[in-house]
Image: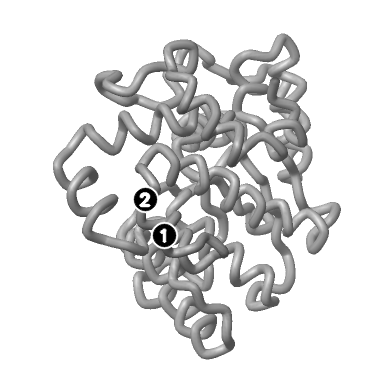
Amino acid sequence: MTFKRIYILSTGRTGTNFLAQVLNDNIDDFNIGHQQIGSRAINIFANLPFENDIYLYFLYKLFNFFNRGVPPKSTIDPLLSVALYKLIKFNKIKTNIKIVHLVRSPEDFVTSFLNWKDQSWKRKYILHFLLPFWNPVPLFHGVFFKKWVLMTKFENFCWIWTFKNTMFDDLQCLQKENYHFLKIEDLIQSQNKKDYLKNLLKFCGVKPPKKLKLNTDIKVNKSKGNKFPKYKDWSDSCRFLLSEYCKDLKIKYGYK
C-alpha cells in the first residue's frame, strides 16, 4: 500500500504515543515514527525565530543529516512539528502530504507538561531551563521583554499551547482537503470514538478494518507523580492565566 506523507503535528503531551500505537494497530505495514536520533537538534533549530530561505534550506537539510529522510515519510514526533510547519508553510514541502492537527485541552496539556518536566533533572534544569530554544521563546513572538522575564513556567506553557496550535491552524487554509483536525479526547472519552478513528483512517487513505483496534485503557501520557494538581484543584490565579492565554482557541476547538 502506498501512503502519502502523513504529518501529525502537535504541541507535545497530547497522546502521540497512544495515537501512534492506534494507527500502527489499524494500518498494515505502517510504522509511524516517534522520537528518533536528531529530533532534539531539529526541534531546537526549528524554534529559532527565522523564516528566510537560507535558514529554511538548512532546516530542510537537517532531516538528511540525521538520516530522517527529506523530510520523513510520516511522523507523529512532536519535536518535529514546528520544523515541518515552517517547511510546509514556505513551500519547501510541496506535494503528496496530509496533515493531522492533534490537540489536547490546555488544562491537561499544561498539567501534563509541568509534571513531565519535573520527572528528571535533565528536563527540569537543562531542556527547560538552560536551552532557551527547546521551546519557542515568547520574546521573539510579540511578548514584551519585561513580561517575558516575569513569566512563570506555568504561564509559559499556557502561551506555548496557544502559539503552537495557532501556527498549525494556519495550515488549514494552505492545505484545505489535506488537513484534518483531531482532539485526542474524541478518541478516548467520546461515545463515538470509533467513528472518529474511522474518519482519521479514511483521511489517511486507509479503508478502516472491520474490527477496529482501539484500546482506551492505555494511559495517554505516562507521567510519574503529580506535583502539579489537576485543573479542579488549581488556584484562581492559574485559572485566570490559562483563560487569558487560551480562552479564544479553547472556544474555537469546542472545549468548555
Relative image position of residue 194 (x, y in whole percent): 71, 18
Q: Quadrant of residue 17?
A: top left
Amino acid tagged 1: Lys
Checking the image for residue 146, the label placed there is: 1
In this rendering, the answer to whether 232 lies above or below 99 is above
Residue 14 at x, y = what percent?
51, 34
Count residues near mark 2 (Cα–Cα under 10 Å), then give few for <14, some for 14-19, many for 20+: few
Which residue is more in the foreground, 203 or 138?
Answer: 138
- Classify residue 221 as left or right of residue 186: left
Q: Give the residue displayed 28% in from the left and 38% down from the top.
A: 117
**Residue 197 drawn above or below residue 91:** above
Residue that appears at 62% across and 22% down: 185
* Residue 139 seen from this side: yes
Residue located farthest toward the bottom when viewing the structure as drawn: 54
Reply above or below: 11 against 67. Answer: above
Residue matched to label 2: 150
Task: Tell me the amino acid under the disc marked 2.
Answer: Leu
Q: Nearer the viewer, residue 80 or 2?
A: 80
Residue 90: x and y, percent? 67, 76
Mark 2–mark 1 CB contact (< 8 Å): yes
Residue drawn at 45 percent across, 36 percent down:
13
Relative image position of residue 164 (x, y in whole percent)? 57, 52
| Circle 2 SS class | helix
Mark 1 residue crowding within 10 angstroms, few (<14) / some (14–19) / many (20+): few
Q: Quadrant of residue 51?
A: bottom right
